[in-house]
């Protein structure tokens, strides 16, 4: 009986406390509504500002043109960011990922229905050449490490003849100085420049053994 009395007293106390809370809430509901309206208004303003900023960024990137001389004076990081912005301009959802241990990927992008692209950037002095070893590295990581449908090596210099031939033979696209000028300065979309297929391709690393 003692336990039952304690339980009953506790239930009554809880009921009274709940009643007091409900009464206070009912008395202060206009204030709660004002707070909710203020929060909703603040959130709406933030979303509007973000939308306007994104729209402005999109318009800016849509007009993006970068000359070879501007690309030449960039450092490696700036060059990678420039390639990311060019991909975004072309409609890709692109992210700069280049860093130590990046497994031959400096920028990764995605665009429906083209799929996923991995870009390896090779910023060099004017007249510098990219050799076949870069092509080997990109082929070895593009599919297994990054699940890419397309892979491309971009340089503001040039490629050795063997590197271009090996890339063409193994499905690794390349953008040399002349092609970079068409992409960055003339404004031709990368997927049009490289004639990427309109559906996900089966690259050599995706073929069944």
Image (cartoon, rainbow, N blue to C red):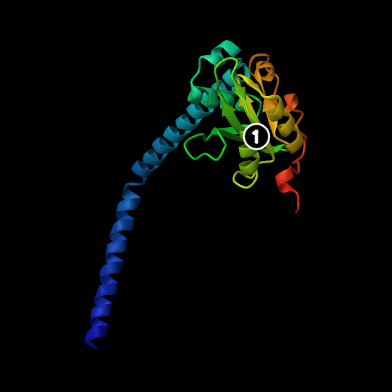
* Nearest to the observer: residue 160 or residue 103: 160
Question: What is the quadrant of residue 135 in the picture?
Answer: top right
Does residue 44 appear to the left or right of 175 in the view shown?
left
Q: Quadrant of the N terminus?
A: bottom left
Q: Going by the picture, which residue comes out furthest to the bottom? A: 1
Where residue 61 sits in the image (x, y, percent)? 59, 21
Circle 1 crowding by C-alpha within 10 Å: few under 14, some 14–19, many from 20: many
Residue 67 visible in the snapshot: no
Which type of secondary structure does the marked residue at label 1 adopt? helix
Q: As displayed, is residue 44 above or below residue 82?
A: below
* Nearest to the observer: residue 115 or residue 152: 152
* Nearest to the observer: residue 60 or residue 38: 60
**At 70% from the left edge and 34% from the top edge, which residue is drawn?**
172
Question: What is the quadrant of residue 15 in the picture?
Answer: bottom left
**At 61% from the left edge and 38% from the top edge, which residue is drawn?**
137
Q: As displayed, is residue 60 above or below residue 195?
A: above
**At 61% from the left edge and 27% from the top edge, which residue is drawn?**
88
Q: Quadrant of the C terminus?
A: bottom right
Where residue 201 sits in the image (x, y, percent)? 76, 41
User: What residue is disc 1 on?
Assistant: 135
Does residue 153 appear to the left or right of 28 in the view shown?
right
């Amino acid at each position: 009986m003692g336990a039952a009395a304690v339980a009953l007293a506790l239930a009554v106390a809880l009921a009274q406390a709940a009643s007091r809370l409900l009464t206070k809430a009912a008395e202060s509901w206009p204030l709660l509504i004002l707070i909710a309206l203020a929060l909703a208004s603040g959130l709406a303003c933030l979303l509007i500002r973000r939308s306007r900023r994104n729209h402005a960024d999109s318009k800016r990137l849509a007009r993006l043109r970068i000359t070879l001389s501007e690309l030449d004076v960039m450092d490696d990081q700036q060059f990678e960011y420039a390639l990311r912005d060019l991909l975004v301009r072309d409609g890709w959802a692109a992210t700069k990922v280049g860093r130590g241990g990046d497994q031959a990927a400096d920028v990764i992008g995605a665009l429906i229905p083209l799929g996923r692209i991995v870009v390896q950037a090779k910023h060099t002095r004017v007249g510098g050449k990219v050799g076949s070893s870069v092509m080997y590295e990109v082929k070895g990581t593009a599919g297994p490490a990054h699940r890419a449908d397309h892979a491309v090596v971009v340089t503001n210099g040039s490629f050795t003849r063997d590197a271009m031939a090996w890339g063409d033979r193994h499905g690794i696209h390349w953008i040399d100085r002349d092609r970079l000028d068409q992409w960055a300065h003339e404004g031709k979309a990368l997927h049009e420049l490289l004639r990427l297929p309109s559906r996900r391709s089966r690259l050599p690393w995706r073929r069944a053994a």
